[in-house]
Image (cartoon, coloured by chain):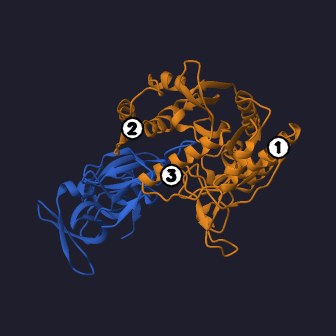
Chain colours: A blue, B orange
């Protein structure tokens, strides 16, 4: 694996620290008027999700982590594992719930997800930014209430619950932003 | 936003230009002469924490020339030649220094005052900071020992590397180790004390450890502890100036250069050539003087209330 020096630390770079794969979020160069320069580096541990700040001497090096993002199609859940397939090579990987995490509530078969592989095994799964899902349960719609006014909870086919406008009814397909977990619009069928 | 465009707004560049004018006026009033010295140098500084950028020799000679990391050596030669008080606003270059407050090419304001004391120089520096702010905040002058006692309850001149490392680890997640007390002092200063200094005041911190003297005189303080006659100026957690009661002893200069070289060799760094002209000039006798270097871009940041140096530089290194 390549080795990176503190001046190459950029947001998004994946490195190994204390045996754990970490993603660099921010890198601040700190130098006293005279003397040793330091880098204050904000990182996320990709195994635990912990975010913290570590101080390095400028010029210190870390080994890159074999962490790669792959666009993969979600196939199915066998009750224990979530299965994904590379649509070009047809290569499949299986991810456990720990790796899939909160993404599980947005996963629809055939949607393209970003699967982060560490040494070839799934470390995390990011759903598409926008998904179109069917509402399986919500209170009855209110006639005449179109755009403004309140919201109500609606449960989606994948398990997620989002707040939707009062006029939305069961069986409708809506577009959601998975990053904020919010309703975006109705999808005309 | 297209990447051909400046990162600084035109308004910020106007404020920068106005500040340049104000500074020139400030020194004209005080009878300090503006000078220009070459950006190219035959020998860079030997300080192990500053890396110069080598360039091809324009005359095709066998040795490279270096982009200056500060105009200090050339200005000292002028002082020896009898220039009297001088200042310069010029570009300086340092390899690898890039960040929210650093660009590898930056603008330095440096001046030397044969008539002033270090204490008077601190006041003059505060006056320049006030020009940038358009306001004169209160000035706090504290010794290096006082700030370490106040914020960390430790005497920086006597603490061991292990004690300082332990203190640093209480405040920061640090992966490296070192038996060099100065490294820990520099880390504690820049990462713990600096951010905690009162934001509304200009802080002048003076009497640094003798081991961090650079080219300042070393003298005993009132407790008999040898200290470097140096100060740094801070405002809003930002280091703005480095001032010195300038070392005059040429043989001490040679000893400090060889210490830098030894430290560089131990760390596997290159050992740059020694500036023979500076040595000769120092042997002729540098007048008793104080001198200071200020980051002009940081002053412009204060004038523009900018959080990043890119906001006051037309084209930072990422856009050249």
> B151 above or below A79?
above
Q: In screen coordinates, is B21 left or right of A162? A: right
Numbered tag placed on residue B261 in the rendering:
3
What is the CA distance from the residue labelled 3 to the residue labelled 2?
Answer: 31 Å
Crowd band around label 3 with a 10 angstrom C-alpha radius: few (<14), some (14–19), many (20+): many
Residue nearest the observer in this picture, B181 or B42? B42
Q: Quadrant of the C terminus of chain B?
A: bottom right
Identify the chain of the residue marked 2, using the numbered disc in the image. Answer: B
What is the CA distance from the residue labelled 2 to the residue labelled 1?
Answer: 40 Å
Percent x, y for residue A137? 26, 54
Percent x, y for residue B63? 61, 69
Q: In screen coordinates, is A74 left or right of B33? A: left
Q: Determine which quarter of the picture holds residue B286.
A: top right
Q: Secondary structure at mark 2?
A: loop
- Look at mark 2 in the image and give the residue it sits on: B172
Percent x, y for residue A142? 38, 51
Query: Tag count in the figure?
Result: 3
Q: Residue pushed farthest left?
A: A79
Identify the chain of the residue marked 3, using the numbered disc in the image. Answer: B
Identify the chain of the residue marked 1, using the numbered disc in the image. Answer: B
- Look at mark 1 in the image and give the residue it sits on: B22
């Amino acid at each position: 694996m390549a080795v990176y020096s503190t001046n190459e630390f950029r947001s998004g770079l994946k490195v190994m620290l204390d045996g754990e794969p970490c993603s660099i979020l921010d890198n601040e160069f700190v130098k006293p008027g005279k003397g040793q320069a330091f880098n204050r580096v904000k990182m996320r541990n990709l195994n635990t999700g912990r975010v913290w700040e570590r101080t390095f001497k400028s010029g210190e090096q870390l080994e890159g982590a074999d962490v790669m993002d792959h666009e993969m199609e979600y196939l199915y859940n066998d009750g224990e594992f979530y299965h994904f397939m590379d649509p070009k090579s047809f290569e499949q990987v299986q991810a456990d719930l720990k790796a899939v995490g909160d993404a599980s509530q947005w996963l629809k078969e055939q949607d393209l997800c970003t699967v982060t592989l560490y040494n070839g095994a799934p470390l995390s799964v990011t759903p598409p930014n926008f998904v179109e899902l069917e509402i399986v349960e919500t209170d009855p719609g209110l006639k005449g209430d179109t755009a403004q006014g309140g919201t109500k909870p609606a449960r989606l086919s994948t398990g997620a619950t989002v707040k939707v406008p009062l006029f939305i009814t069961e069986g409708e397909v809506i577009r959601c932003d998975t990053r904020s977990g919010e309703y975006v619009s109705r999808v005309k069928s | 936003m297209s990447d051909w465009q400046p990162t600084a707004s035109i308004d910020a560049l106007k404020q920068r230009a106005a500040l340049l004018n104000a500074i020139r006026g400030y020194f004209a009033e005080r009878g300090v002469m503006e000078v220009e010295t070459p950006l190219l140098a035959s020998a860079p500084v030997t300080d192990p924490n500053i890396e110069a950028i080598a360039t091809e020799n324009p005359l095709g000679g066998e040795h490279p020339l270096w982009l200056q990391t500060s105009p200090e050596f050339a200005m000292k030669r002028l002082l020896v030649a009898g220039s009297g008080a001088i200042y310069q606003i010029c570009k300086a270059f340092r390899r690898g220094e890039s960040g929210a407050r650093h660009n590898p090419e930056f603008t330095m304001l440096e001046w030397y005052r044969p008539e002033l004391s270090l204490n008077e120089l601190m006041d003059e520096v505060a006056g320049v900071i006030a020009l940038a702010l358009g306001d004169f905040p209160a000035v706090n002058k504290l010794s290096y020992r006082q700030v370490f006692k106040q914020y960390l309850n430790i005497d920086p001149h006597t603490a061991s590397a292990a004690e300082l490392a332990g203190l640093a680890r209480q405040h920061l997640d640090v992966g490296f180790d070192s038996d060099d007390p100065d490294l820990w002092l520099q880390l504690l200063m820049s990462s713990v004390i600096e951010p905690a200094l009162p934001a509304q005041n200009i802080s002048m911190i003076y009497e640094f450890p003798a081991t961090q003297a650079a080219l300042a005189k070393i003298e005993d303080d009132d407790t008999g502890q040898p200290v470097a006659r140096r100060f740094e100026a801070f405002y809003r957690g930002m280091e703005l100036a480095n001032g010195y009661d300038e070392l005059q002893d040429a043989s001490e200069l040679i000893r400090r250069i060889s210490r830098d070289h030894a430290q560089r060799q131990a760390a596997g760094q290159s050992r740059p050539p020694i500036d023979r002209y500076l040595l000769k000039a120092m042997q002729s006798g540098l007048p008793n003087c104080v001198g200071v270097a200020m980051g002009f871009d940081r002053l412009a940041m204060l004038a523009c209330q900018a959080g990043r140096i890119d906001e006051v530089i037309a084209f930072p290194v990422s856009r050249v």
